[in-house]
Amino acid sequence: MSAATLLRDVFGFDAFRPGQAEIVEAVAEGRNTLAIMPTGGGKSLCYQLPALMREGVTVVISPLIALMRDQVRGLREAGVEAGALTSGDTDEERDAVWQSLEDGRLKLLYMAPERLASGAAQHMLRRIGVSLIAVDEAHCVSQWGHDFRPDYLRIGDLRRELGVPLAAFTATADAETRDEIVAKLFAGETPEMFLRGFDRPNIHLAFAVKDQPRRQILAFAAARKGQSGIVYCGTRAKTESLAGALREAGHAACHYHGGMEADDRREVERRFQQEDGLIVVATVAFGMGIDKPDIRWVAHADLPKSIEAYYQEIGRAGRDGAAAETLTLFGPEDIRYRRQQIDEGLAPPERKQADHGRLNALLGLAEALECRRTTLLSYFGESVETCGGCDLCDSPPEVFDATTPVRMALSAALRTGENFGAGHLIDIVMGNETEKVRQRGHDSLPTFGVGTEYSKGEWQAVFRQMMGLDLMRPDPERHGALRMTEKARPILRGEQEVRLRRDTIRVAKAERQVKT
Ligand code: ADP
Ligand code: ZN
């Protein structure tokens, strides 16, 4: 199975995190590698996934017993044969692992370094057909660091004896440690190194609230006429209509999605690669294997489904290092759609929970109040000194204390049993005597008409930002009725304040003035 298929079907991720794809490829091909990634960057996947692509057993050396057990449990839940040999094992646990090794079923064998000291374990490793050694926390081999583990020094010998490739991982990047890892684990043979930070300083980051999405995309493309770009859309139909609109506006543009004939898709890929200034309007099906260095811009006509997917998609721009620009549009519909997609999927509950988390991270980025690059990279565990460019650094948004309107909105939802969507709740706080409001008696609620100082558009912006901050979530079982999340409780209790961006709320006001 391909790496992309395993990523989705076994691990349940829709996109690689920064750096993972390249490392997975190198490790799967059996090259010696040393990868330095920040904590939380997703190192374990970089040996777990290749382990499934290779014949035989991958031995994972890790100093952290609790972490090994967690990983083994997670892998087993995902249907992968994995086991651990640590000093804390019972005889039964050890027997079970040995048995599955004998049967040739085991794909990943986690070992604490001290187990390498035992002759029996070494003998066993020589016999069972190890195809790869993965070393987590590889800096533990460094005598100068404070995490030194003497047993790590045995790993170099093990590699030589078994004659298999070795992949070493660490979050510690300083040059001395790196040299020591190379000397001790690879006996001085230089492994392939992966040390790229996650920051892509030449890519400018920007988000905008959907207002007239087609016009927004056309304006963005018009300012970059003649440059190669990609527009990502949430649906196949939209790729076709938007490509048509771009052509009408005088651009060279074509659409691309998974429902097209393979030949037609290849033709678009070929044209994109060879022509200058072509715009491809595509679903996420476009990307894997696109290797064009001079893509100057990437726009999202709809919100991607996770922060990882966002990073991967914008990351296709500016591979040549020259300036590239991005724009991601989002609105309340996107948030609803993405949540619904997760809730209606077939994934088990914990995975849905995690998917909501990854969507929340993206929404947090969309509604960020300060530098987007800092927000994005801190999610991946990295910090940046300077921002290479983002819309929020270009012009910092004005924020205001929105605790009062947010509490009004929350209280309207609570007092109506969390049974209604934003439209009805807005009618309540604005004091609109609609038929639905009258029928349900909501005009006699204490929250009825408390928020007349905001227009409907402004209230929509407040609700959208609240969803972005995950204070409220549409309930999939009940047609998007908004439910309060745990995060909202301290605000409702008056223990915490909320700040919202004023600019998007002002945009709403300006629109109202134009319309009336
Ligand atoms: P590290 O060992 O680098 O600190 P982990 O391997 O524990 O990090 O991964 C950190 C988190 O990132 C885990 O919760 C993992 O499930 C998640 N993760 C890893 N790869 C991906 C991916 N491609 N997409 C989404 N989440 C990922
Ligand atoms: Zn910035």
Image (cartoon, helix red, strand yellow):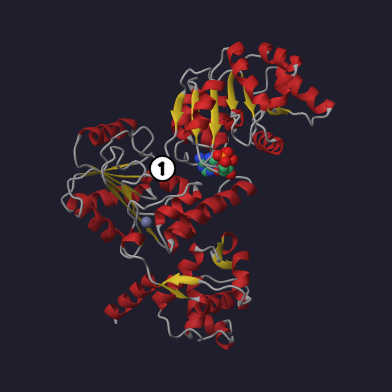
Q: Nearer the viewer, residue 438 or 366?
A: 366
Residue 209, horizontal then vertical, whole percent: 37, 63
Element class at badge 1:
helix
Q: Would you say 178 lies left or right of 153 here?
A: left
* Residue type, numbered disc 1: Gln
Residue 109 visible to an observer of this rendering: no
Q: Nearer the viewer, residue 480 or 97?
A: 97
Residue 53, horizontal then vertical, whole percent: 54, 24
Q: Is residue 463 above or below residue 388?
A: below
Q: Would you say 95 lies left or right of 282 here?
A: right
Residue 475, horizontal then vertical, whole percent: 58, 62
Residue indicated by mark 1: 312
Residue 196, horizontal then vertical, whole percent: 42, 37
Q: Is residue 50 above or below residue 236?
A: above
Q: Residue at x 23, y 52 (%)?
A: 221
Q: Would you say 513 lies left or right of 410 here?
A: left
Instruction: Look at the image and tell me in which quarter the C terminus lies.
Output: bottom left
Q: Would you say 303 lies left or right of 110 here?
A: left
